[in-house]
Image (tube, rainbow, N blue to C red):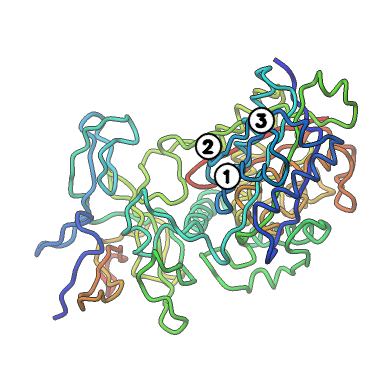
Amino acid sequence: MQKQVAVEDGLFSWTAEGVRLIGGRCIDCSNHIFPHQPGCPKCGSAEVVKVELGAEGELWTWTIQGYPPKAPPYIGEIGERDFEAFGVGYVELPEEVRVEARLTENDPSRLRIGMPMKLVLVPLTINNLGEEVMTFAFAPKGSDNE
Amino acid sequence: MSEVAIVGIGMHAFGRHDGISGMDQGVTAVRRALGDADLTWEDMQFAFGGSVSAGAADLMVSKLGLTGLPFINVANGCATGGSALFSAWNSIKSGMFDLGIAVGFDKHERGAFRPSTAESGEWYGQSGLALTTQFFGMKINRYMHEFGITRSTLVRVAEKAYRNGAMNPMAWRREPLSADQIESSAMLSYPLTKYMFCSPGEGGVAVVLASAERVRKMGGRPVFLKASAVRSRRFGSFEVTAPHLPIERSDGPTVDASRISFQMAGIGPEDVDLAQLQDTESGAEVMHMAENGLCQNGEQEQIIARGETEIGGRLPINTDGGCLANGEPIGASGLRQVYENVLQLRGDAGSRQVPGNPRVAYTHVYGAPGISGVTILSR
């Protein structure tokens, strides 16, 4: 199988038990953020510890990216023939935070606000070492992509 | 504290101008504003100016004259023009100066804005996120879900923009588009189609400001700047290019800038005769009507269907065609709205003149990274 690498180290953990986003939790006010950063946007505290966020949530809002993003910074397919529209949404992880992510679904008729979603990984491109570069995405629960 | 008046306005047409730098479009705007005020560059005691993609504004002194004036560059994202105006307004209000100029201009590469993800991490743009168009699609999709706004309202807003733009010789897009053309154009970011979005563009606008005392000596047809406010985002607001949002929600910077502006001006939304609102896409105009206090959430569906935001309606909005017909040269966009309102309050807006002798006009600009600027003008 082709070797797979994360688009960026420290963004998500990736073990036999599955994928988890690595966010932050403020020691002082319990606010959650993603990705981790040294500073809480709610209370200004510098004490933000790394935590694994929940892997399931509800779709809070969504859109479909219908045209190829500019490259750089995008590293996925942008060619007229190869670009495929992709979903983008915010998924609410209960009692934690809403996270912005790609969606595995790009058909508007199969997306609705409030539907249950699950964290997965999707390939973006093949890097110059021949490795598959992966980023995180959410899939509708019960779909083939889950 | 002194009242502040706008005594001169100048604009370089918006659009695409091959071979003319963004800076030179700013210089043209300054010359026209000075001519409109019957003043010279030597009369200017200070300048605030900026662009996002077309260089440092203070370099324009080499073309306008090296007079030694304090020229402060403003770099404040999508509120760059609004922030230049806010700073100029404060400089006169403080009593330090009684005559000065604010200028904004820009020239962006073609196509959608290229995401800059220096702050959020490279993965964000690499993964196909961080596009401003995605934010607008997701914000209006959620808003339609919560408040029952329909696609036909989004189409109507765009139709109005191109219809108004057709009457504006300074606009980029001056061809009316049919509802069908708008609705069937490419779906860029669901539920928004190509013609529901504005495009990054080029242009420049300058505004000459004077104290009320100075205006009494000068004469002319001053329009008073009753309020000017710029606000950044608070925790809990839903803003452009945010890898995460907290679950608790708060009002956005537009609500905050609007409230403080009405307080400063000592009037309420019911006193506004016309408004220029940020319409990056048609949904933004709809949502910003409520965020600026001009209606309640959800009322837009009926207000727009009844034609109340048309030039002949109860509350005309984006009478010059807005961002949809003018495009968005970021540094100039907020000042374009002020330019249009001054024309309207003077009665000089030609075929798109709002009838009934309007007295109070409102502007609102919004953009990355979650910043809003509001002004209230009155005769």
Q: Residue at x 52, y 40 (%)?
A: B371
User: Residue B67: x and y, percent?
Assistant: 70, 34
Nearer the observer: mark 3 or 1; the answer is 3
The local crowd at label 2, few if under 14, some if 14 to 19, many if 20 or more residues have their Cα within 10 Å, is many
Q: Amino acid at mark 1?
A: Tyr
- Of the image marks 3 and 1, the number of the one nearer the N terminus: 3
Q: Amino acid at mark 2?
A: Pro
Q: Amino acid at mark 3?
A: Ala
| Pick the front one: B56 or B229 | B56
Q: Residue at x 69, y 43 (%)?
A: B335
Q: Tell me, for residue B366, which label it has, or none.
A: 1
Judged left or right of residue B172, residue A67 is left
- The reply to whether the C-beta atoms of the residues labelled 2 and 3 are less than 8 Å apart is no
Mark 1 falls on what kind of element?
A: strand
Chain letter for mark 2, please: B
Chain letter for mark 1, please: B
The local crowd at label 3, few if under 14, some if 14 to 19, many if 20 or more residues have their Cα within 10 Å, is many
Classify A79 as above or below B350. below
| Pick the front one: B14 or B185 | B14
How far apart are the alpha carbons under marks 2 and 1?
8 Å
Q: Are marks 2 and 1 on the same chain?
A: yes
Q: For residue A4, what is the image quadrant?
A: bottom left
- The reply to whether the C-beta atoms of the residues labelled 3 and 1 are less than 8 Å apart is no
Mark 2 falls on what kind of element?
A: helix
Classify B203 as above or below A107. above
Q: Residue at x 81, y 45 (%)?
A: B32
- The reply to whether the C-beta atoms of the residues labelled 2 and 1 are less than 8 Å apart is yes
- Dot 3 corresponds to which residue? B88
User: Residue A67: x and y, percent?
Assistant: 49, 71
User: Residue A17: x and y, percent?
Assistant: 10, 62
The quadrant of the image that shows the C terminus of chain B is top right
Q: Tell me, for residue B253, which label it has, or none.
A: 2
